[in-house]
Structure formats: structure tokens, C-alpha cells
């Protein structure tokens, strides 16, 4: 277990943040018409599920939900020491003419978002794609700018942001930890 | 997370976790084939040579499609019309191709052991697409994927392999893979087409087709290699069909749901009646579709191989 340097968001804070993000998404899109939420696997997909529930509570409409695996679109696929697991992309609706909100847990270099955009464009032609992230920790390597941000955090390269979600990890929290040394 | 070997030479000694990883990955890649743009950029910049020293239709097309779906650059080589006909050795052929900067080689050859031999003379990743009577690992993997799709698991399931076991690399790889994954395997065919010592692989043996049908949950029916018929390993095609041909009547007698598989190409009316091949019990075309997905999975997993974990194989 890596050393935890700070708790960035606790359980209550996470619930509050997601509610705010859901309101922002609905406000910006003037409702839920033609709106769809797609989460980047794995934790982005869980956050997307929660956002869909909150939007339903606000608007009384359940917007389409999808999950996107971007492994096959990564630009570091053959460089990583540990091979990433290819998971299923599950988008059970047509993307064409939809306003898509892409959801990820942490925005860092921007390479994951770039891969997600490429993957989406291979699946259809959405009217627009917006980006929602729980944490923006900076250090961008590509010109990617989120539309909705849960929390902006100033981090150093030697740190990592870990998002823990009840569905996967048994608790809701966002932690700032010391990055493990490369093996 | 990753395969424990840098090459895919066969399924002998391949652990269950590797087979499971390949099948899981293939299952997730299969949906790409149904997309409006059935292509992902994963192997962009990777060059794959399909080195076919033996005739092949579906395996070669299947590999080529898998490579193209992953955006790899592909080169097709067939022995006919190549410098092999001028007397060039296998080693020289491969080293010359490698000198043109390639990354992976998919090889089919009539001699067992050629894929292993190639690992000794090139740095490229080697994938066996069938070597003599030895192994045809991607065929067995696609067979296992198709059965797993049907059953959800292979553990405890009974698969009978029917026909020319002696000359079949498909049977060899299937027996190894299915046993590793916890399935039970029976082989069935004329005595002349069942190799001695096959029981050492932990398989049941029968020479009576009705017994195999009674025992099995699925029948993997092998092609009778008509070209070998001249050697007199069984009296006649008609007699083979009478004794070992899968007919609707025979299946009906078993009074149970049975899955029918065949690696193709089918000799209709010999090992398999046409109406059985086209029946609801047949998953032959699923096998073909899954073949592309399995080969995509193998290419993806071997292209991202973690060299720090390289085993001796």
C-alpha cells in the first residue's frame, strides 16, 4: 500500500461533487434531450453510472449510459511494462447526433482522453463531446481541456491520485498518494 | 497481467490462465467486427508476415483480417512462386524477410517444429498457424472460445473428437487445450486413424461412433483427408461414412442437445451430412467468426509482450 499524503475528497464530498456535476451537465445541455453519458473504464464507467442516476433524479429522464474501453487506442500500448487488460466497450445506442459527456476519474496528461475521443469517433459521429472529470491534477501533455471538473488539485509528478469507489473498492474516497517506484 | 510466453508455438504447456486471458480478450475484441468502422489502431506500425508454406484458405484469410482489423501492415508470402522454389533454405528465407524489418511472423508449414525453429533464427514474434501433424493452436483456441460461448465454461464438459486423429494437428491442440481447461476429451475413429499411446494424453478412446455420441456434449468432427485415402487407412469413403459419418438419424438417437463443430473445409456427405452441417446444432460458422477474434487477441497480447517476464518457451 502506498503512503497516503492527503484525503482529497471523502464519501460525503464525493456525493456532493457528483450532484454538482450532474446539475452542471443538465444546465449546460439545457436538459437531458439527446444527452448520453459514457464512462471510460473502469472507474470512469462507475462514475458515469452514478451521474446517470443523479440526472434522472434532477430531470426525471434516464439518459443513455455507455462504457468505453480505450486500451486498444492507447499510444503506449507496446511500451508499458505491464500489459493492460482489454475490456469490453459497451455502448448500446447510436452516437450520431448525440451530445456525449465523456466521464473519467482523473485527468492527467490528457492521453487517455485523446484515446477515448479516437475510440468514440470510430463508433459514430456525435453532435458534440464534452469531458467531465472528477479530478484534474494538471501536467497535461496534450491540449485537452475538461468541461466539468469535480476538483482541481495541484500535484507533483511523484504523486498519484487514487479514486476509490464503493462498487470496486468498498469505499468512496479520493486519495493523494506517493507514486510507487517503477520496477 | 500478460501471456507467459513471447511466442505461440502450440498449446502444450500453456497454462490455463494464458488460455483464459486469450479467450477473454477475444470475447472483448469480437464486438469490433460488428462496428461501422471495424478497425482499431492498436498494431499501427507493426508489420506482420504471413508465411504460408502450405495451402490454406480460412486460416490465412482469418489471420490477415485480424491483422488488418488491428491496423497492422501485412505481407503475404506463399512458397509457390517464391525463392523457396529456387532452393533457398527456410532459415535464409526468414532471415531475409526479417532484414526488411518485420515484427511478427505467422507461419504454416508441413513440417512439425518449424515455428520453434524460427524462434531460433529470428527475433520476430512467432505464431504457429499449423505445423505438420503437430499443433494448430489458434484453431483449438477458437474452438474453445465457441464452446465457452455456448456453455459459459469448459470445466467438466465432454468433447468428442471424431475422425482422423492420427494426422490431425487440430486434434492435438484441442486435446491439450481442452484438458488444461478442465474439459473431458474422447477421441473416436477407425483404429488405423487413432495413434497408439493417445491414452497417455488423458483422453478416452472409442472406435464406435454411437458410443462417442452417447458420451459427448459436443462433437468436433475432423475432415477426412481424402488425399491420404490412397494409403488405405480405411477401406472406402462410403464405408467411412457408414461407420463414422455424422447423420441426423444418429444424432436423433442420442435424444439430447449436441453441439456439432468442424474446423473446415467440410467434405459434405463424408464426415458430416449436409443437413447436419447446416442444422441448428452446428456452430461451424460461429467458429469461423471467432477465429478472427481469437487471432486478434493473440496478435494483441503477443505484440504487447512484457519481455521482463519472458519464459524459456
Image: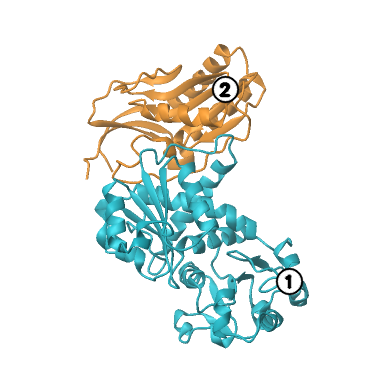
Chain colours: A orange, B cyan
Q: Quadrant of residue B247?
A: bottom right
Vertical placement of residue B159 versus B82, above or below: below
Please indicate whether residue B114 sits to the left or right of residue A27 in the image.
left
Label 1 to label 2: alpha-carbon separation: 49 Å
Q: Which mark is residue B256?
A: 1
In the rendered image, residue B110, in percent from the top left (x then y), is placed at 43, 69
For the residues beneath circles 1 and 2, the answer to whether they share a chain is no
Vertical placement of residue A137 versus B280, above or below: above
Q: Residues within 10 Å of mark 2 (few under 14, many from 20)?
A: some
Q: Residues within 10 Å of mark 1 (few under 14, many from 20)?
A: few
Out of A177 and A68, give the one closest to the viewer.
A68
Q: Quadrant of residue A116?
A: top left
Label 1 marks a residue whose chain is B
Query: Can the viewer see residue B25 in this picture?
Result: no
Out of A55 and B76, give the one closest to the viewer.
B76
In the rendered image, residue A170, in percent from the top left (x then y), is placed at 44, 42
Residue at 54 percent across and 74 percent down: it is: B184
Quick one: quadrant of the C terminus of chain A?
A: top left
Q: Which mark is residue A126?
A: 2
Vertical placement of residue B205 versus B119, above or below: below
Q: Which mark is residue A89?
A: none
Out of B65 and A117, give the one closest to the viewer.
B65
Task: Indicate the secondary structure of the residue bearing disc 2.
Answer: loop
Please indicate whether residue B56 sits to the left or right of residue A143 in the image.
right
Task: Indicate the secondary structure of the residue bearing disc 1.
Answer: loop
Q: Quadrant of residue B16?
A: bottom left
| Of labels 1 and 2, the one closer to you | 2
Residue at 65 percent across and 83 percent down: it is: B236
Amino acid at each position: 500500500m502506498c503512503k497516503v499524503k492527503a484525503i482529497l475528497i471523502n464519501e460525503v464530498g464525493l456525493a456532493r461533487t457528483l450532484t454538482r456535476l450532474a446539475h452542471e451537465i443538465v444546465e449546460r445541455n439545457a436538459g437531458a434531450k439527446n444527452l448520453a453519458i459514457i464512462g471510460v473504464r473502469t472507474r470512469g464507467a462507475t462514475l458515469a453510472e452514478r451521474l446517470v442516476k443523479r440526472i434522472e433524479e434532477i430531470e426525471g429522464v434516464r439518459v443513455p449510459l455507455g462504457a468505453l474501453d480505450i486500451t486498444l487506442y492507447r499510444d503506449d500500448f507496446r511500451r508499458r511494462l505491464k500489459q493492460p487488460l482489454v475490456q469490453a466497450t459497451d455502448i448500446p445506442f447510436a452516437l450520431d447526433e448525440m451530445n456525449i459527456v465523456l466521464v473519467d476519474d482523473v485527468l492527467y496528461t490528457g492521453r487517455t482522453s485523446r484515446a477515448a475521443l479516437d475510440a468514440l469517433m470510430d463508433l459514430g459521429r456525435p453532435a458534440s463531446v464534452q469531458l467531465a472529470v472528477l479530478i484534474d491534477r494538471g501536467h497535461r501533455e496534450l491540449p485537452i481541456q475538461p468541461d466539468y471538473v469535480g476538483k482541481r488539485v495541484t500535484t507533483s509528478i511523484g504523486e498519484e491520485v487514487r479514486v476509490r469507489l464503493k462498487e470496486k473498492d468498498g469505499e468512496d474516497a479520493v486519495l493523494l498518494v506517493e507514486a510507487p517506484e517503477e520496477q | 497481467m500478460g501471456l507467459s510466453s513471447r511466442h505461440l508455438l502450440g498449446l502444450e504447456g500453456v497454462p490455463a490462465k494464458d488460455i483464459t486471458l486469450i479467450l477473454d480478450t477475444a470475447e472483448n475484441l469480437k464486438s469490433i467486427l460488428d462496428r461501422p468502422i471495424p478497425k482499431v489502431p492498436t498494431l499501427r506500425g507493426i508489420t506482420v508476415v504471413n508465411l504460408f508454406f502450405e495451402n490454406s484458405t480460412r486460416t490465412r484469410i482469418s489471420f490477415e483480417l485480424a491483422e488488418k482489423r488491428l491496423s497492422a501492415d501485412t505481407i503475404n508470402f506463399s512458397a509457390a512462386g517464391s525463392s523457396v522454389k529456387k532452393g533457398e533454405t527456410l532459415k535464409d528465407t526468414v532471415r531475409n524477410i526479417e532484414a526488411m524489418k518485420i515484427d511478427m511472423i505467422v507461419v504454416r508449414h508441413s513440417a512439425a517444429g518449424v515455428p520453434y525453429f524460427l524462434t531460433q533464427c529470428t527475433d520476430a514474434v512467432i505464431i504457429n498457424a499449423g505445423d505438420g501433424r503437430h499443433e494448430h493452436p489458434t484453431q483449438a483456441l477458437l474452438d474453445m472460445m465457441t464452446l465457452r460461448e455456448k456453455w459459459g465454461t469448459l470445466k467438466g464438459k465432454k468433447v468428442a473428437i471424431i475422425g482422423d486423429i492420427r494426422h490431425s494437428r487440430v486434434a492435438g491442440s484441442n486435446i491439450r487445450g481442452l484438458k488444461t481447461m478442465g474439459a473431458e476429451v474422447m477421441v473416436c475413429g477407425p483404429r488405423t486413424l487413432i495413434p497408439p499411446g493417445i491414452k497417455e494424453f488423458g483422453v478416452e478412446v472409442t472406435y464406435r461412433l454411437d458410443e462417442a455420441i452417447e458420451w459427448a456434449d459436443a462433437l468436433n468432427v475432423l475432415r477426412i483427408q481424402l488425399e491420404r485415402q490412397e494409403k488405405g487407412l480405411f477401406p472406402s469413403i462410403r464405408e467411412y461414412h457408414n461407420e463414422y459419418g455424422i447423420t441426423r438419424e444418429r444424432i436423433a438417437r442420442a435424444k439430447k442437445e449436441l453441439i456439432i463443430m468442424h474446423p473446415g473445409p467440410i467434405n459434405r456427405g463424408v464426415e458430416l451430412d449436409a443437413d447436419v452441417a447446416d442444422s441448428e446444432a452446428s456452430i461451424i460458422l460461429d467458429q469461423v467468426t471467432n477465429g478472427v477474434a481469437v487471432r486478434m487477441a493473440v496478435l494483441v497480447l503477443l505484440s504487447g509482450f512484457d519481455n521482463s517476464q519472458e519464459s524459456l518457451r
